[in-house]
Amino acid sequence: MSENRIVIIGGTACGPKTAARTRRCDPKAKITMIEQSAHLSTATCGLPYYISGVINKEEELLKIREEFFEKVMKVEIMTNTRALAIDRPAGEISVQTNGSDGVSKLKYDKLVLATGSSPIVPRLEGVQLKGIHTLSNIDDANTIKAKASELDVKSVVIVGAGLIGMEMAESFAVKGLDVTVIEALDWVLPTLLDFEVAAKVEKHLRNRGVKLLFGQPASGFIGDSDGMVRKVIAGKAEIDAEMVLLSIGAKPNVELARDAGLALGATGGIAVNQYLQTSDPNIYAGGDCVENTNRVTGKKVLVPMGSTANKHGRIIGTNLTGGSDTFPGVLGTAVVKIFDYNVARVGLSESQAREAGYDVVTAIVSDYEHASYYPDGKELMVKLVAEKPGGRILGGQAMGPGEVAKRVDVLATALAFRATAEDLANLNLAYAPPFSNAMDPLHKAANVIRNKISECAVALNPMEARHVLKTDEDAIFLDVRSTGEWDSCRIEAPQARLLPLGELRSKLDSLPKNAEIIITCQTSTRAYQAQRILISEGFENVKFLDGGIVAWPYKVAVYKPYQCW
Amino acid sequence: MSENRIVIIGGTACGPKTAARTRRCDPKAKITMIEQSAHLSTATCGLPYYISGVINKEEELLKIREEFFEKVMKVEIMTNTRALAIDRPAGEISVQTNGSDGVSKLKYDKLVLATGSSPIVPRLEGVQLKGIHTLSNIDDANTIKAKASELDVKSVVIVGAGLIGMEMAESFAVKGLDVTVIEALDWVLPTLLDFEVAAKVEKHLRNRGVKLLFGQPASGFIGDSDGMVRKVIAGKAEIDAEMVLLSIGAKPNVELARDAGLALGATGGIAVNQYLQTSDPNIYAGGDCVENTNRVTGKKVLVPMGSTANKHGRIIGTNLTGGSDTFPGVLGTAVVKIFDYNVARVGLSESQAREAGYDVVTAIVSDYEHASYYPDGKELMVKLVAEKPGGRILGGQAMGPGEVAKRVDVLATALAFRATAEDLANLNLAYAPPFSNAMDPLHKAANVIRNKISECAVALNPMEARHVLKTDEDAIFLDVRSTGEWDSCRIEAPQARLLPLGELRSKLDSLPKNAEIIITCQTSTRAYQAQRILISEGFENVKFLDGGIVAWPYKVAVYKPYQCW
């Protein structure tokens, strides 16, 4: 291996990690890393926080310098340099440095493509106007930051309510801008969350002054005589915008690979095997430019993520130097801070699971992040998606001001091992009052899944319950909370009726045995209990509202706000 | 099942959960729950926070009332009632209510022992003195709280540095008392943590004014003429104490079971099978009174924990009513808040793993809880214990002001599935700058384990490194941080020498090739890199200090405190 010439194209995440791992495993390899921008290892995930000012200095995002790679890692660095083409038979690539006319050649024994991804720019009328931006590097961020700090830019439209759209909605709002988010699909984070989880995020965004427009793709942009964007067209609406951020997704940078005849996958990403080898065994690829295997479905997916890029880099570095390491795939795990809410998800959403053909069962649990008697506990909501009848967990979502990343990381770990609801229910998670409940929301959700599979629990999700309330005027919508809770907030419907759980057994006569009864409470714990009572007393058509009032995605009538988050 | 008479002895955690689950599964069962105290479902885990005043009212810990069980769950409740004996042939138990002379009999078809555990009271001279307490129920807590609030009680000695001892050290210190903790073993949380992790907890406790005395069991108590405790004897020391808390552990309450001829395990807990059935198939047992299976070793253990008791209760309730649910065992997971530090652990510590005969490899990683460039990140340290050569994870510990519960919960999940370091390294954990790093400390620790197993990384733990520093004056203790860091804090030793990583390759000549070299830096990331460089340059005896200066359990010379937590 002493003459191993390794060329890495791309210096953001996968590339530098590959370089470092390669050097640690092979002190003699000749390693060259090419980066088209001026910077290595840019912490691009931090850009929204740099724009908002949470991170003060550009340098914070550019901590690893060329000097480090050259002096410590003995890696030859070529920044401001673009790879133009791969000549596979010759084992060389042609590169060009910015500002220079000359194209030079670089020989490789092994080549690594860590070319990343680029923001998708839709081909729309006016998309070339000034003031329309994407965000993928520090230069973008500096441009946007400068504009967002100008006094004359007051309104911004974000096109796309994905992760970056949500982070930037907060970022712009924090800077005092008037923010509108346009999303072609029907709710925020539409490829990550199900409707009822997204609906609570949406409420939070609206409470913080962010305007949201769903079901309308941006269809064009209107500018002024200076060529500056002034309006965004979405359906029939024209929304004022002094700046626009396009955040409708990223596409893998595969031109080099494609032009060199390397296989691409159906997703459009570079196809790699488990060793992260492309169709040419001398060429590896990792990071945003490759497609990954979804560990739940086994299907190929595009999930660009800095954390995955780092894992790829280590594996490629190992394999470049005689090792044999494999990457098992991804779970689409994501977490995002949206003002005071934490939002996270993993695996398949309910809609994705149904689309993939699973026989789906779900649970929604609202709870405090720690023991309810320990002060300052923040709320969170967990949605679990599992498969009938075995109870295998397919995915999960968690959301709220409380600690949700922990729950989703536990689920990410459980999903990697194809855990069932029974496995989850028996996890020996760390318990102490300042940190958790004796029964964590995950335990509770797992048990709800088990109760539903055994038909001990029968629930309607909010959408189903709302349909019943809209179509069956004879149904009973039984709220089993206390009078005080009822007075504080409730779901209003003509069929709504209060009967506190403690009085249920003594007032069974007030309920018709053959009516359709939907029971609700704050979180659905009491409603489930009430269902068990009614079923044991011969009521035949009794269901409870999953997640209770806390998880109700529609209007809740609030009379004393503190009780409903 | 319509005549199923179920009697549950014990009303704190497992008992009430059993009652509730039983009722949900069997509407007709006759369920009776006996509790020797006046309260059901006492949240005993909250007692230290009730004493400190973090939780204000007793009622917060006593939220579930008899009325709930009677009216909603249709469970007959007998509080202030003690079970005296089990007559298995007759299928009945004898019970006695406080203040009454009469003994009555209760018939059962199925009996559940949820008798809990009691604090161990050592048989020591003077242990009966007034002012010496244990803490296991609300009455204990009220007594201690009242005394700790008296102006004339200024000093308290805690005997035993386990979980309750640590929680109470904080609780008493918060109330302004002078606190001394005596521990017979050599460090805090000795059955939970390894020395180097405990050492940092110890520093934190001492910084908060808590006095600690290790390696000395309390051997007796000295009182005054009123029979009030005044001193605790430990070795040659006599420590002033106006109050004493005994927190040396809990023993399972097995008298009823033993007297009835039920099998006990070698641990002293009630023996149960995976269905939580005792040696009598009509008698189930759960919660603190039973022994559990450690999921790592397969051995029986006593790990009383409210979270386990709740899981037991659900399983017993299922099995009492025709189901067939099993409990897979525990992992000894624990978390505790100690002032501003969070401390958690799972599985086997290094010493436990060695004792159990595993070929052990460990990793120590210090890091921020989230991306270093995102502000207000708090530090944490993770220690991972794994088995050679396969890399199976055996346990983990995490500690620091940062978010440690998340990491230990991920490990608890991974351990349940016998995860390897490779599995852990590839977990798709949720990543975004406010929540985590692209490479989580767990990923890093898993990769350190892999590097050590492949002998790419060779480290000394702090104890080994200190031994070298004390015994080999020709060794070189090479600090590869920057000059600024060196000036700020360092491990002082005659062999210590500064050579920043960036200068290492150019100054190799300054190092003798045959010397024993121990490399250190802040967290050991750079030291590992330096080791790879030196080994590649032909140095033969090069190791790095695991965990770096941050994890150094001994004295660190601090000149600018902000750099070392």
Image (cartoon, coloured by chain):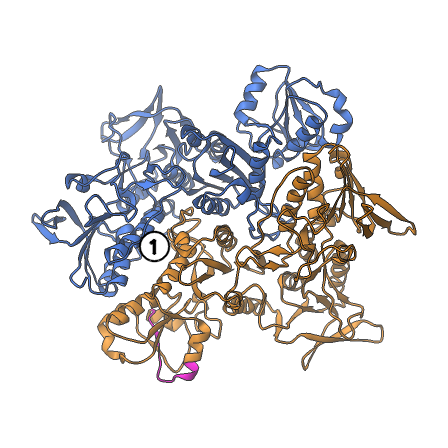
Chain colours: A blue, B orange
* Residue A487 quadrant: top right
Residue at (77% x, 71% y) in the render: B127
Q: Is residue B122 visible?
A: yes
Q: Nearer the viewer, residue A528 or A550?
A: A528
How many neighbours does mark 1 have within 10 angstroms: few (below 14), some (14-19), or many (20 or more)? some
Position of B87 with respect to A335 (left or right) is: right
Type of the residue with mark 1:
Glu
Segment tinted magenta in the rendering? B469-481
The residue that mark 1 highlights is: A60
- In x, y percent, where is residue B94? 85, 49
* Residue A242 quadrant: top left
Q: Is residue B480 magenta?
A: yes
Residue extending farthest left: A102
Residue extending farthest front: B89
- In x, y percent, where is residue A356? 40, 30
* Residue A468 quadrant: top right
Position of B167 with respect to B449 (left or right) is: right
- In x, y percent, where is residue A324? 29, 54
